[in-house]
Image (tube, helix red, strand yellow):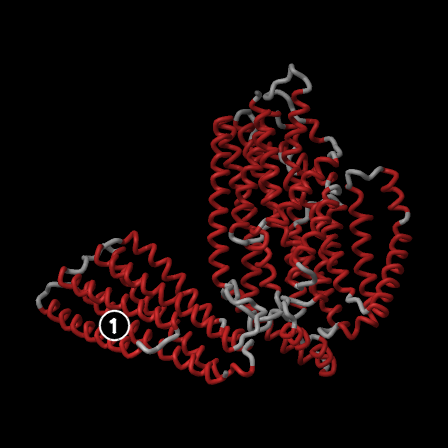
Amino acid sequence: MSIYLIFVIVLLLLAVSDLVVGITNDAANFLNSAIGSKVAPLKAILAIAGLGVLVGATFSGGMMEVARSGIFHPDKFYFSEIMVIFLAVMITDVVLLDTFNTFGFPTSTTVSIVFELLGAAVAVSMVKIMNSADTIAAMTTYINTGKALAIISGILLSVVIAFTCGMIVQFFTRLVFSFSYERYMKYFGALWGGIAITAIIYFMLVKGARGASFMTAESISWLENHTWQLLLFSFLGVAILFQFLITIFKVNILKIIILVGTFSLAMAFAGNDLVNFIGVPLAGLESYIEFTSDPSLTADTFLMESLRQSVKTPTTFLLMAGFVMVVTLFFSRKARTVSQTEISLARQGEGVERFSSSKFSRAIVRGSVSMAKIIDWMVPNKAVRFVERRFNPDAFRKKSRTRQAASSFDLLRASVNMFVASILIATATSLKLPLSTTYVTFMVAMGTSLSDRAWGRESAVYRITGVITVIGGWFFTAITAFTVAFLMALFLNWSGFVGAMITIGIAVFYIIRSNVVHKMRSAKQARKDELPENETLNGENIVQQCNASIIRVVGSVSKLYFSTILNLIKDDRKKMKGVMKKIGDLNQYSKELKYNIYPILKKLEEDSVDTGPYYVQILDYIREIAHCLNYIADPIYEHLDNNHPPPIPEQVRDLHELNESISALYDEIQNIIKKRSFRDLEKLIVQQHSILELIVRMKKKQVKYIKGELVGTRNTLLYLNLLAESKNLVLYAINMVKSHRDFLLSHKGNQ
């Protein structure tokens, strides 16, 4: 079997893998508006999107030329060099996209493939230049710099255009309909629906159809000659139909627009982005077929001029690729992880923010607040009051409280997201520009959320940081894709077949490992989301929530404190490092419990309001306990990390006694909470006093050790801090149990 046939087989296998990781990343682009607005059950949304992907796959034929000759001049490379470029690109692409998917970070598959092709082609071009008498100026002979710059600038420009279009369209749409859009639908709904659906039909069927693999020249010519007739009849037909549905059947046409938009956006995604996943492997297959057509040809002398020709991609290949993407769409859990990032940044309501604030975001918010004051001063008061009334989100909040499944934003904004993004992506597809669907859909969503005032002063700094982080990630994608593909191409060019097998093996291992990491992260996130967002809380389930939180914290503290003291005694820095990570997770959990006080108390039923203060007090003690554990562990790890002397034997004996006493106390607390019985509380207080007396004795002994010069400064500071925080750990624990007792009594009193 020829080495190049093996390379082609590997490319095709990598194409399947790339389709899986690619749609996992890009599914967020066409699912988020439908999922975020809860327009339909998830399975229905996925079915509609899957159908759109299958149909859109047949529209990608014309886009395949980007992978063949869009970045470099294929007629300047030999067959052996082309195969190195393609293999380096595909290995890099699969690993890079899978990494981003694992951590739920949306990135641009278009940016990655463009810069991977550029990096690999530059690497091979440099090898060719070094082996000839040419200078580095000859690079333009091999790289299609004009087309590459046009593609890159088009992608970057799409960020500004998408954000601006989304912001403007959403502003005027909200101005017309307001957040109480239902009352205005009977007047303007049919007109709005006609515009939205007609725009989608125009750009998807008229513009997008030019690149379809099944379209003949006569069909395309007919569409071009009858464009305005199609638009007019589409608008009139859709507007009349929608008015009929609104008036007679009271149908919410926004749901229809969103579902049609989901279909069209999925279709646009497949038409524009399928090249990112199968363009390179198909180009490799065509190159191999062309090479083997003449047995007299050699891989190092056969120039790939055939890749410059425009070739229609067989519809069968496109449909097979679409089928793989549809299956992945239904079963990929990573796709849900990626979707959550955009939905959380665009949501109308409050909640836990994924990103922290930054100096840049704080500066933007301060500048925006100052600018808003100037605008309010310049604009007439009547106009300001009118806009304020139209953008008052109270109606959305009221619906979110009464709705069984609270949405992240309303149907009106979701419909704008859909049709604006569809228009922009389909336009780029018709012009054969590999516009980034991730850039467009993400920035449209951010623009509409800004217009909708989803970025209020409660959350603006965090949302802006999130947007900046995602955009920064896109630039990181470009740099990483270019660098890794460049190095990969150099390695493959030097190592040949053996190197290719090694890199493929490493890539497979990496993907398997990343799936394990993702499962661990998903399990951790599932534990955070123990309380459903839409659940109404009464006395009983807040008791259950409180019990679960205390049991989890108390159990963790018991184990982590015991391990911390044991690691100090054994002078085990390595194990202490692992304990520090778990303590960090516990601190984060206690912080999230405290942060969620507002949404939890807001969901309390009226007859359970009296239990609220006790719940708050318990969370305060949980937070303080987690802090104490952190204040104990941090100095101990620093002590071990700096290789300071371990405790002396006399201290070790006392530390063992203290360790066992505190662990026994926390185990007893855990039993009390589980049983919800406080008959043994007095016994627990006796244990507390015993531990406090032990700590006093240990402090007195430490003074004697200091006087006898048995210990040094580092030992003294560490030991006294440990004893002080251990005392707090015991005091807070008993106070938490007492608060929990009062909490349960309050709950029983309300029944």
Is 276 on the left-hand or right-hand side of 61? left
The amino acid pointed to by label 1 is: Ala
Residue 434 place in picture, x, y as percent: 68, 45
Is 447 on the left-hand or right-hand side of 581? right
253 and 541: which is toward the camera: 541
Which quadrant would the N terminus be assigned to in this image?
top right
Count numbered badges in the picture.
Answer: 1
| Residue 401 sits above or below residue 272 on the image | below
26 and 358: which is toward the camera: 26
The residue beneath circle 1 is 724
523 and 13: which is toward the camera: 523
Q: Secondary structure at mark 1?
A: helix
39 and 161: which is toward the camera: 39
Which residue is painted at 57% across and 26% down in the image?
Answer: 6
Toward which corner of the image does residue 85 lie, by quadrant? top right
Packing grade of label 1 (10 A; few <14, some 14-19, many >=20) is some
Toward which corner of the image does residue 465 lie, by quadrant? bottom right
Which residue is painted at 50% across and 47% down in the image?
Answer: 515
Residue 52 place in picture, x, y as percent: 73, 49
Which residue is painted at 54% across and 58% down in the image?
Answer: 469
Is 516 on the left-hand or right-hand side of 373? left
Which residue is painted at 24% across and 74% down in the image?
Answer: 687
Q: Is residue 601 visible?
A: yes
Q: Is residue 114 visible?
A: no
Is 507 on the left-hand or right-hand side of 648? right
Residue 337 place in picture, x, y as percent: 56, 55
